[in-house]
Each structure stands twice: as structure tokens, then as C-alpha cells.
């Protein structure tokens, strides 16, 4: 074992350019980080700069450094998709070849909607692909005043249900989502995630989502690196929506985050504790607040806030810690539509053990992350998983 603790932080949706097959996903020319840099006036990220982010990806405001402190590369996604689950599952060894079913163009089938109405006792409104903030402005007053239920989807494999915390209550919203998850286990309706979308406010213009979102995801299709680590007696600590994405599989401790800044603070606090194993963090605000809402300025400011918290994390890391920064897909805030984009993602690996960093060869799967972690801890990758270790390149 070369590292006693590994921290993997996912900057959700921070892609670094369209993959070679992006056109098949209608994402030709997408470039989340590049287009943010092209758009914003400032991008103050001294810690990411020192690690070598601008060496990996040319940025208008940030020059590359002569001696980066981290090893860096671009990673392709092997799975057939561009969503949260396929990206995270692949990091931990699961390749997804059959994409999750989507209802973007049609809405959900009448049979499903009828059954959901019957089980929930409310008339469903919406039933289309939409931005969460837009559909609240459009239909929120109906839900609040008339007791109806907003159900919608996106380009992702999701069924999303809105619930006003003051008039419906979280308990009821979560119950409706549990019903929807049960119904969508049927093959023809089998979405990747059912998502509770709580909000507050009573009229258009005042509606605001809260941090009490909850994801009801499908279980991974097989054992992952997380299961292998837990079974071998290591700590597997999740921060943010990691626990939801893996449905608790392989997790020994779960921490809910109110925001990405909060998620980083939780990670910093965990780094000050004694543990042995993996801390796996997802920072969702990049994606949820700025990528889907096509707001490059807000996205750039979120990257700056992350960099500031990164500056607090780095000093508390120990000599035998390994930090990996990455992403699960792209979500170009300058691109058409509101969906994720099929992109390369960054890989930055840093340890105080390293004399210096540098470029390493591009990889064709995110699964090198999980394989490297299992190699470090001397744990066997579960049967049926993919990926190979690059541990020797990080020493």
C-alpha cells in the first residue's frame, strides 16, 4: 500500500472537450471548460493552475506552469452514455453498453402516468422534458394552489417529481418518489434515476429549489470497487450524492451536502480525521446550478469557489494521501439545449509524496481510477469490471 487514504473529488460535469464520438450524441464541438474560459472575464484558480489544469487544457485567463505539482491527463468514457450514473459507475469499474431508457421526446407513457396518479392520489401535470427552474415557473402555482403533481424528465434517463416543502412536505414527496421508483423497475419504464425536486415559494418568480433533493437510482449492475474496498475492511466515505448514485452499495459512511462548497468543507473535515481507505466526493452545483441552466459566468464563479476550498484542503492532506480530481461527463453551459455533453474529462492526481507532476498518456476509460485505487490497497477488482491501474505512473 503506497497511499493510506485516497480522495476522489468529482467536479460534476467539468468536461474538457468533445470526445471523438460526440457527434453521435449530438454534442459535436462541446467544450465545457474551454467555452467557460472563452466567455468569462476572470478565472482565478491558482491551486488548479499549480496542479497543471492549464497544462492539460488551454485556458484564456490561466497560463500553464513550468513544473505542475500533479500528474494530469484526459480520460475518455468507455460506456455508452453521458450521464451521472454511467460516469460514476465506470470510475468504479462498471461499463454500461446499453444506455438507460429516456423519455425526452415523448414524455412518459400514459399507462405509467395513470398508475402514478392512482397511487399518489394527485393529477399529474407537466410530463415533458424541461428545465427544473422553468417548469416551476410554469406550473408551480398549479401544484401549490390546486394540489397537482409536477412530473417531468430531461435528456437524461430520469423521472423527476417536484414538491413544495411547505404545502406538500418532504415526507410526502419522498413517498411519491418511492412509488415512482417501484413502478419504473419495469423494463419498458426503467429509468436510471427517480429524483425528488423539493422547492419553496408560493408564486411565480419566487420558487426556489432546496438542498433536500434525493435520488432513487438503480443499483449498479454488479459489484464495484466500492464493494471490494468495503469487503476488504477499508473505509468508503461518501460526500454529496455518491451514496445515492451507488444506492449505498459499498459505502461505509454517507454525508449529505447542502452545496458544493459545503461538500468541500465536509471533505476537508474528513481529511482531518483518521481513516484508512477512500473518501469519494461529488460536487453537483457545477452541473445542477450552472451547466443545465446554461450559465457560463455562474459556472466560472463556481470553479473559483472550488479552487478556494481546494486551497484549504491541500495543506491538511498527509504525506501518504492521494488526491484525484476528475469529472463524470460534460455540460457545456454555452451549448444548445440543457443536457449533458459527451466530453473528455480531466484527471489530476496529487500527493505530497510526489517530487513533481507531469503529463501522462490519455486513457480510454474512467475505470483507471477504480483500478488504481484497488491496486493501491492490494484489493482484487470485482469480476466483470473493467480498468487497469496507473499507480506506478503516479509514484
Image (cartoon, rainbow, N blue to C red):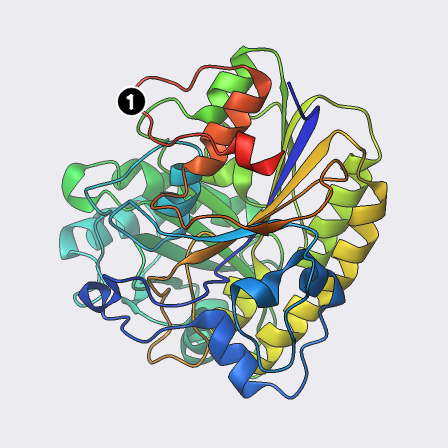
Residue at 26%, 65% in the rendered image: 22
Q: Residues within 10 Å of mark 1 (few under 14, many from 20)?
A: few
Q: Residue furthest toward the top? A: 232
In the image, what residue occupies the spot 65% across and 69% down? 302
Can residue 209 be seen by looking at this rendering? Answer: no
- Quarter holding the N terminus? top right
- The quadrant in which the C terminus is found is top right
Residue 110 is left or right of residue 5, and the answer is left
Q: For residue 146, what is the image quadrant?
A: bottom left
Query: Vertical placement of 370 versus 333: above or below?
Result: above
Q: Quadrant of residue 139?
A: bottom left
Residue 13 position in % (x across, y down):
48, 60
Q: Residue at x 35, y 36 (%)?
A: 218
**Which percent across, then down, holds residue 154?**
32, 64
Q: SS class of the residue under badge 1?
A: loop
Which of the two residues, 11 or 179, is positioned nearer the viewer here?
11
The residue that disc 1 covers is: 384
Where is residue 289? Give x, y as percent: 55, 68
Amino acid at each position: 500500500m503506497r497511499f493510506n487514504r485516497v480522495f476522489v473529488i468529482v467536479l460534476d460535469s467539468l468536461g474538457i472537450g468533445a470526445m471523438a464520438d460526440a457527434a453521435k450524441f449530438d454534442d459535436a464541438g462541446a467544450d465545457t471548460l474551454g467555452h467557460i474560459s472563452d466567455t468569462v472575464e476572470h478565472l482565478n484558480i491558482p491551486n488548479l493552475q499549480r496542479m497543471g489544469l492549464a497544462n492539460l487544457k488551454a485556458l484564456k485567463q490561466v497560463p500553464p506552469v513550468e513544473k505542475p505539482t500533479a500528474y494530469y491527463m484526459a480520460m475518455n468514457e468507455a460506456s455508452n452514455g453521458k450521464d451521472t450514473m454511467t460516469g460514476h459507475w465506470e470510475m468504479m469499474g462498471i461499463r454500461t453498453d446499453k444506455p438507460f431508457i429516456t423519455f425526452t421526446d415523448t414524455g412518459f407513457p400514459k399507462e405509467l402516468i395513470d398508475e402514478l396518479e392512482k397511487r399518489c392520489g394527485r393529477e399529474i401535470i407537466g410530463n415533458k422534458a424541461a428545465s427544473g427552474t422553468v417548469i416551476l415557473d410554469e406550473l408551480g402555482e398549479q401544484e401549490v394552489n390546486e394540489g397537482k403533481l409536477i412530473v417531468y424528465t430531461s435528456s437524461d434517463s430520469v423521472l423527476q417529481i417536484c414538491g413544495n416543502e411547505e404545502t406538500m412536505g418532504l415526507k410526502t414527496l419522498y413517498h411519491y418518489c418511492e412509488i415512482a421508483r417501484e413502478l419504473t423497475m419495469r423494463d419498458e419504464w426503467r429509468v436510471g434515476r427517480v429524483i425528488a425536486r423539493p422547492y419553496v415559494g408560493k408564486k411565480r418568480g419566487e420558487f426556489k429549489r432546496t438542498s433536500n433533493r434525493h435520488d432513487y437510482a438503480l443499483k449498479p449492475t454488479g459489484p464495484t470497487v466500492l464493494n471490494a474496498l468495503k469487503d476488504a475492511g477499508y473505509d468508503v466515505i461518501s460526500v454529496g450524492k455518491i451514496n445515492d448514485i451507488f444506492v449505498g452499495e459499498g459505502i461505509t459512511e454517507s454525508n449529505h451536502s447542502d452545496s458544493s462548497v459545503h461538500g468541500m468543507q465536509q471533505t476537508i473535515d474528513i481529511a482531518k480525521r483518521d481513516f484508512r481507505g477512500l473518501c469519494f466526493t461529488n460536487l453537483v452545483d457545477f452541473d445542477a446550478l450552472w451547466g443545465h441552466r446554461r450559465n457560463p459566468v455562474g459556472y466560472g464563479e463556481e470553479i473559483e469557489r472550488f479552487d478556494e476550498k481546494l486551497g484549504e484542503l491541500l495543506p491538511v492532506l498527509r504525506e501518504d494521501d492521494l488526491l484525484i480530481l476528475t469529472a463524470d461527463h460534460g455540460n457545456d453551459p454555452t451549448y444548445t439545449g440543457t443536457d449533458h455533453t459527451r466530453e473528455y474529462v480531466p484527471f489530476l492526481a496529487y500527493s505530497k509524496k510526489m517530487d513533481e507532476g507531469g503529463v501522462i498518456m490519455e486513457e480510454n476509460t474512467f475505470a483507471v481510477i477504480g483500478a488504481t485505487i484497488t491496486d493501491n490497497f492490494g484489493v482484487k477488482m470485482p469480476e466483470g469490471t473493467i480498468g487497469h491501474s496507473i499507480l506506478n505512473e503516479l509514484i
